[in-house]
């Protein structure tokens, strides 16, 4: 666990970066003062998009399977966290809680953590030092019109 504070975020957008033709999930702090773009894989973007749109695939996707396995073990996802960034690579965590067990923390990719969070409706947190290192201020309407 990091010694820094965490900031709760929500998913503001799921977009495609036209320069790299790669999906980007954009997280936004509760105060709407900082955005955190994270470039992700196409399959994770699809998994996040399906969950955001409330679409249930006919067969469980990998993230659905993992959630079912966690629930079958009498645990639940307490929260997910983007804990660090190292040389442009983000690192995430799943925080699991069971009926008689303290929180267990599992290392994971942030895109997988976010895909799982969208399925179990848990909070997403970002370590404050990650937000400081990689967060950006949102553009005002005027700034966006100029671009």
Image: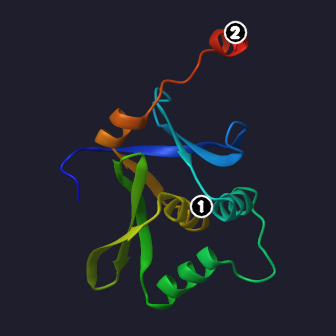
- Residue at point 67% right, 16% down? 144
- Residue at point 48% right, 24% down? 137
**Around disc 1, counting alpha carbons within 10 Å, would you say few (fewer than 14), some (14 to 19), or many (20 or more)?**
many
Residue 118 is tagged as 1
Query: Residue 130 vs residue 138: left or right?
Result: left
Instruction: Name the element at disc 1.
Output: helix
Mark earlier in primary sequence (2, 1):
1
Residue 52: image x %, image y %?
A: 69, 56
Which image quadrant: the N terminus?
bottom left
Kindly tell me whether residue 81 is visible in this rendering: no
Query: Residue 10 vs residue 53: left or right?
Result: left
- Residue at point 22% right, 53% down? 2
Residue 38: image x %, image y %?
A: 53, 46
Extreme residue in the bottom direction: 72
Q: Which residue is mark 2?
A: 146
Which image quadrant: the C terminus?
top right
110 versus 145 height, above or below: below
Residue 66: image x %, image y %?
A: 54, 81
Quadrant in which residue 132 is drawn: top left
Between circles 2 and 1, the one closer to the viewer is 2
Query: Looking at the image, which is closer to me, 90 or 63?
Result: 90
């Amino acid at each position: 666990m990091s010694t820094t504070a965490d900031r709760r975020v929500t998913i503001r957008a799921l977009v495609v970066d036209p320069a790299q033709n790669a999906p980007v999930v954009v997280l936004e702090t509760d105060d709407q003062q900082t955005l955190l773009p994270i470039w992700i894989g196409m399959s994770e973007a699809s998994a996040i998009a399906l969950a955001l749109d409330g679409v249930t695939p006919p067969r469980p996707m990998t993230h659905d399977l993992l959630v079912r396995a966690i629930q079958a073990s009498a645990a639940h996802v307490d929260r997910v966290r983007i804990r660090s960034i190292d040389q442009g690579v983000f690192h995430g965590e799943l925080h699991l809680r069971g009926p008689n067990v303290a929180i267990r923390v599992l290392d994971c990719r942030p895109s997988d953590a976010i895909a799982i969070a969208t399925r179990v409706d848990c909070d997403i947190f970002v370590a404050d030092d990650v937000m400081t290192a990689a967060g950006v201020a949102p553009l005002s309407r005027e700034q966006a019109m100029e671009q």
